[in-house]
Amino acid sequence: MKVETQSKKGLRTILSILVDKKTIQKKIEERLNELQSEVSIKGFRPGKVPASVIKNQFGKAIYGDVIDKLLKESSAEAIKEKKIKIAGQPKIDLKTFGEGKDLNYILEVDSLPEIKLKSFENFKATEYVIKIDSKIVNEKLKEIANRHKHFEDRKEDEKAKTGDQIVFDYSATVDGNKFEGSEGKGVQIELGRDLFLKGFDQQLISVKKNETRSVESILPSNHPNKELANKKTKFECKILNVKKPKETLINDEFAKHMGAKDLSDLKNLIEKQVSSQYKQALDSITKKEILDQLEKIHNFDLPKSLIDSELAIMTQNLKKEEKDKHKDANEKLAKSRIKLGLLLNEYGEKNNLKVTEEEINGEIQKQIRGMPGQEKMVIEYYKKNPQAAQSLKGALYEDKIIKLLKSKIKLTSKTLSTFEAEKVISEFNGSKTKVKSKKISKK
């Protein structure tokens, strides 16, 4: 094999590679010998098919397989010989090939830039701490209690009110005819929530136990029987019971029913959950502060192949006119992402940071705990989508790098109430929108 550098400009190198015809012929003969023990052809015993017969029948396919393999092997060898740290997928342009000929092709490859990390000890960022007011915790407690209502029977002569639970049997007809699923037994609905059919429960307000009431409603557009979709339906409802909401006592017993040790523990869990929701958004602001400074002090060329790849991913769901309209802004964002990705990766490698399988599994388990009852679905998702686990690994790797960066810079701690946190988050999101609008207006 012969490798020559045709040109080297910036991060892009163009190589001319030649594999002589003798090498190709040798590879073809080796493949023919392999196939003799594998191919079954009528009229020949297994393993006794002559190489000439195999070549007559499968010659073109064999040549194609050999060339494909040689392209992969020779290009990898050439990259290794020239000590190129490749970025993205190399491009191959075949110049000469064919049986009895040398294989000559051009390999166009982008290399990763040499990155010299600069000192960032003078970086400054704000680390936010959230203080959750007890009033918010108590409001969340009431919301939880309302979602887990208990009901007790009303007296037989008492009328149903909004918020009551009605237990009833029904028999339904469309144009006077019954249909599949037109009867229901022991159905329970909470008046005012409108969860059965649109406007259905409003017609049951003021009913009493043992009363029969006619209700009219429209069947949904997604009804399993398409002929019944959007049809006006008459329901004869026999009221079995009317129940009024029973006040839920928010105490240790209620907390245990919710899976906590006691009321104090439940309050702590709610506080952590609310705090976590705000912290996630505020941590993103801190991270942006750090990354902006990191990007600003470094300057190096970016591989075009990586930029093109990132742009393709970013705009894959956009129409052509949208791509053209925001071309400059999208390219700028793609370059920023690639630059920061390379910087963070360099920092991670320099500090020998790694993500273990145990850490990935630990993160998956954390997701499982946050989705009770859907454990099997989460596990199956990661089994069937290896790229999802890889993406998770990337996120954990980035988190490790950011954590280490935070330990090296000057962090100012700032305690915020939830009201102040919402204001900071809103201003941050607003500033991002303004920047985007300015980019569009300039164009």
Image (cartoon, rainbow, N blue to C red):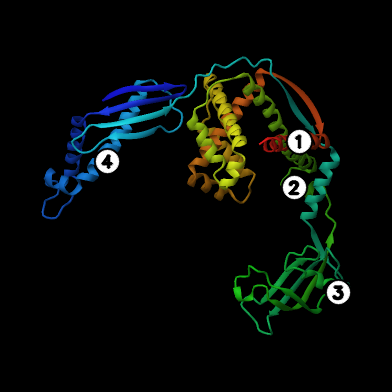
Q: Position of residue 325 (x, y in %)?
A: 61, 42
Quadrant assignment for the C terminus: top right
Q: Which residue is tagged 2? A: 256
Q: Which residue is tagged 1? A: 425
Q: Amino acid at mark 3?
A: Glu
Q: Secondary structure at mark 3?
A: loop
Q: Amino acid at mark 4?
A: Asp
Residue toward you, 116 or 30: 116
Q: Earlier in the sequence, mark 1 or mark 3?
A: 3
Foreground disc of the pair 1, 4 = 4
Q: Amino acid at mark 1?
A: Ile
Q: Which residue is tagged 4? A: 65
Residue at 77%, 24% in the rendered image: 413
Image disc number at residue 156: 3
Vertical arrangement, residue 142 with respect to residue 67, above or below: below
Q: Secondary structure at mark 2?
A: helix
Looking at the rendered structure, the number of numbered marks drawn on it comes to 4
Image disc number at residue 393: none
Q: Earlier in the sequence, mark 1 or mark 4?
A: 4
Evaluate if marks 1 and 4 touch, with contact meaning CB atoms under 8 Å apart.
Answer: no
Q: On the image, which quarter does residue 72 sit in?
A: top left
